[in-house]
Image (cartoon, rainbow, N blue to C red):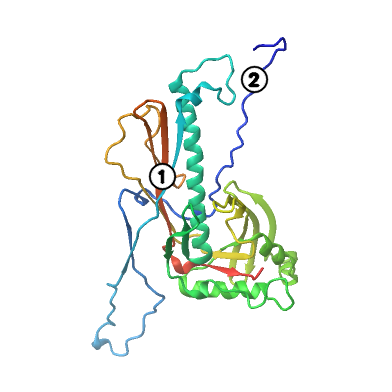
Amino acid sequence: MSLKATKTMLAAYFQDAMPIMFLAGMFRTPAQNFHDTEEVEIDIERSGEDVATVITDITTGANLNNFDGFTNKTFKPPVYNEQAGINAFELLGREPGQNPFESTAFNAKAIMRAMRHFRKLEAKVRRAVELQASQVLQTGTLTLKDAKGADAYVLDYKPKATHFPTASTTWGQTGDSKIADLKALAEVLRSDGLSNPDRLVFGELAFSEFLKDEEVLTLLNNRRIELGAIAPETRGNGGTFQGFIWLGSYRFEMWTYNGRYKDPQTGASTRYWDTGKVGMQDSTARLDLSYGSIPYIQRPSRQLAGLPARITSTAAGFGMTTNNWVDESGSNLNVSAGTRPLCIPTAIDTFGCLDTGL
């Protein structure tokens, strides 16, 4: 019923919580990391820092070396598959932002709504990938839960326990040694990973306590020797770059991360990164993120044209299989989005995480 008052329909507002993939972005996704197989394999050949030794008698010949050994690791990725439905009678109603006196074809409205569903399903899957990355970088393991909260996928990458130490004295308490804790972890990673760690990812509480430390403040406040600087800036990847600091022989970028997701069981807003932990990494080391497709023998015959079948992007570091089908009555459209992602710490000796006790 039209009243005497005139009205203007403004653009609809969609409050979308865009998924942040700061941690997943640290994993590489070249074209070969997108696959249609059940498992993924990686051959790993390690070499140390051996040095040549002197031969005392040239007639005895050269020192013999053997470089034939390598190891093979096989992983079976977990499966994520999300679905949503649209009933034809829902399309009788007005879409967000649509003029109530404007008629729209059912198919066009179905495609518009399906694309909105795809975006929401994609966001859920992206957050699951970020959760994987957060677990790997903080623990070297994966424990993924199903919809009921049970452990449905467990994978231990067997990292060295020395890469995930706990501070001997909780940060912020008398006698703590923040710089010493980080330098000790850096030496362990340098010895095992054969490369210099150069990135720190702080939890909120850990960074707050770090900046209160007198020894840290002395380094940052030194005006003649540039041993560090705090100059926060957002770089668009979800993390906040806080500046840099030299700890002994190691120059570190300092980052903080406040990304969150809604816990499926409790509904609580939960941080990906533990507020009391400090991650340490070599930013150039190889970490892999692979994506397996969701297999279909044959696509449903009642698909709606105009909807995608697969989304793969090496630049965005994401791959997803999509599907849509209409039931026999023609009254219900179903859309699904799924993938089989796996965060693999290929260079597992190049990162670690300090639990500050906070």
Name the spot of residue 281 as percent of width and height, x first.
Answer: 53, 64
Horizontally, residue 115 falls left or right of residue 3, namely left
Name the spot of residue 344 as percent of width and height, x first.
Answer: 42, 60
Q: 10 Å neighbourhood of mark 1: few (<14), some, or many (≥20)? A: many
Q: What residue appears at the point 51 percent right and 43 percent down from the top-left corner?
A: 123
Q: Secondary structure at mark 2?
A: loop
Q: Earlier along the polypeptide chain: callout 1 or callout 2?
A: 2
Is the residue 235 above or below the residue 144 in the image?
Answer: above
Is the residue 174 above or below the residue 86 in the image?
Answer: below
Q: Quarter of the image holding residue 289?
A: bottom left
Name the spot of residue 8 as percent of width and height, x first.
Answer: 67, 17
Residue 9: which numbered mark, if any? 2
Q: Nearer the viewer, residue 108 or 333?
A: 333
Q: Is residue 25 visible?
A: no
Q: What residue appears at the point 32 percent right and 90 percent down from the top-left corner?
A: 56
The residue indicated by pointer 1 is 338
> Mark 1 and 2 residues: CB-CB less than 8 Å, in contact?
no
Horizontally, residue 24 falls left or right of residue 208, namely left
CA gap, disc 1 and disc 2: 36 Å
Horizontally, residue 295 falls left or right of residue 243, namely left
Q: Residue furthest front?
A: 329
Is the residue 136 above or below the residue 183 in the image?
Answer: above
